[in-house]
Amino acid sequence: MTTATNTTTLENAVKSSPSTLSTLWKMAGSINLSIILLLLLTLDSLVGYFCLDRNPSLFRPMGDMGLMTWIDTYGRHNLAVTGWFFVLLALLFVLCCNTFVCTTDRTLRILRNRKQHSTARLLFRLAPHCMHYALLLILTGYLCSYLFSIVIPTQTLVIGSEYILPNQAGTIRFISFDPVTYNGERLYWLDGNVLSPKATLRLSTPHTEQEAVIGFNRPARFNGYSLHLKNFEPKTQGKMHRKTRIDLHVRKDPGVMLYLAGLILFSFGMVLYGCEWIFFREVSKK
Amino acid sequence: MSAHFSLQCITMLYFLGFCVSFVTKRKPLLFWFVVPALLVHVYLIYLRYLAAWPLLPMYMSSLAVPMVLGIFWMFPQTSSVPFKQQILFQRLLLLFCLLWSGLSLCFPKDFYLPFLQSNTWLAHIFLLTGIIGKACLLCCAAWGIISLTCNTQDEKRICMTQSFNWSIWGFVFWTLSMFSGEVWSYLGWGTPVVWEDAVLTTTMAAWFYYGCYLHLHLTRSWKIGYRACFASFGLVILLFATLPDLGPLRSPF
């Protein structure tokens, strides 16, 4: 009797599973859910403002130590201040799921009816979905960046010194330092100081050798690593200055390409959407 | 003319313009207040840029927003908008100009020196698109508020269309500002987000809020009255987004 009842229940479950799945799918992609999530994210970010503004030193190390180490070191132990960040992560995760389901659903619908539209119209109709997928790409890129980045703590190099990358991936030698100095009265506080530092590095592997110039906002890429200038000396032009040195920040960030691609895709989608909005709005007006 | 005195003049001119807008509905008369205010404003921003270029002048957003709003005020309105709502919109823009220039007068954060990492065009795009975006979003909020005062559904619909149009431009510029900030952050510091400045949270909050507003409008999920309330509440979010630009209180006189 019990076995028969169990079989019937199982059959019912199997029969109902497609509809249950589709209900779940619909719920996950619901626009009302998106709206609730966006509102909660707004609220959470506003709470985050006060927490971050009063305790920036708690969040600053996240960029260097990665998400998991940061959670172990700072995040778990200061929940009153970092709680909003965990809520943000959870909300962003649900938003990603919601966006994926909603966008995939609508994109498939558009593609199914693609014969009804011209290619240009089809492209315009896909623009919002392009932006949504781009957002997913950006957020995935961020997550990869904070989870899997290899960050080498600041390396100080003086002229002629070398730094060997992990696993003998290459050698960085500091060759020369040629800063652009500001001389003038307009920026009186900068007179005689370095405006734009430029350090020349020799990047070599057993098979190749190349030179790269790095500066602020001008990193160099080498064998999958990016080399950022963090600090330098001397900062002033004059006789009594410190020994020439640079502080290098070396990172291997697997997420960077993802989020940069996401930014480009989002911008492309936005331009397309803008074109559609202006063009079709004008047409409908006429 | 000192920067502080220039800002006092600007605030006074916007205040007079706002008061006169209740007496007269003739826009040319108000030009006598807004145009000089704009000229002094341009001069003030020129001074701030002159003291920093090629670096980024720090915390200039709350100072420059009223200038962009003033420029928007000069634009002729679309003919589809009823005259009464046009007048209300102009009055609200003047009020926002007054509010934001008053904020930058009472809470100036003009004592910070620019930093060397800001010597890049990305930093300037980040600042300028952010300013334009905020001004557009304020216009969106203004139309939302006006929509709440409308008596007929037709008028409400027209106002909300205006609100939506401004929100699109605001969202585009705000997004461009965020993206240029992210690329700058990667190039300058090697990370997509610099966890040192709380401005990132208010920027994010405004982006989510207006993303939500666009979804509400495009999907027609809420009734027009609720959407108008939502657009109006954007003003509070934008005031929050201005918080990081404000320094300690200083006497305006």
Image (cartoon, rainbow, N blue to C red):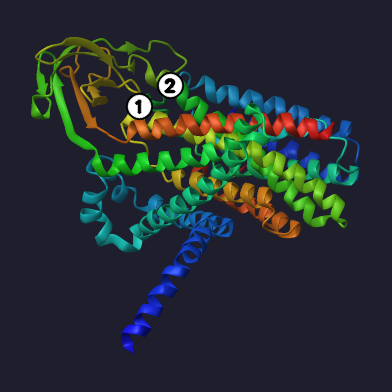
Q: Residue at x 28, y 60 (%)?
A: A78
- Residue A185 in view, yes or no: yes
Query: Outermost residue toward the bottom?
Result: A1
Front-most of residues B18 and A58: A58
Horizontal placement of A204 versus A221: left or right? left
Q: Residues within 10 Å of mark 2 (few under 14, many from 20)?
A: some
The quadrant the N terminus of chain B occupies is top right
Please provide percent x and percent y for residue B211: 57, 47
Q: Which mark is on residue B152?
A: none
Disc 1 and disc 2 on one polypeptide chain: yes
Horizontal placement of A279 versus B188: left or right? right
Front-most of residues A262 and A4: A4
Q: Label 1, secondary structure: give it.
A: helix
Horizontal placement of A4 versus A220: left or right? right
Please provide percent x and percent y for residue B229: 70, 57
The quadrant the C terminus of chain B occupies is top right
Front-most of residues B12 and B185: B185
| Type of amino acid under label 1 | Leu
Write down the chain letter for disc 1: B
Please provide percent x and percent y for residue A108: 54, 44
Circles 1 and 2: CB atoms closer than 8 Å:
yes
The alpha-carbon separation of the residues under discs 1 and 2 comes to 10 Å
Q: Which mark is on residue B120?
A: 2
| Type of amino acid under label 2 | Thr
Asked if A8 appears above or below A38 in the picture, the reply is below
Label 1 sits on residue: B187
Write down the chain letter for disc 2: B
Q: Residue at x 27, y 33 (%)?
A: A253
Q: Residue at x 46, y 34 (%)?
A: B111
Asked if A142 appears above or below B43 in the picture, the reply is below
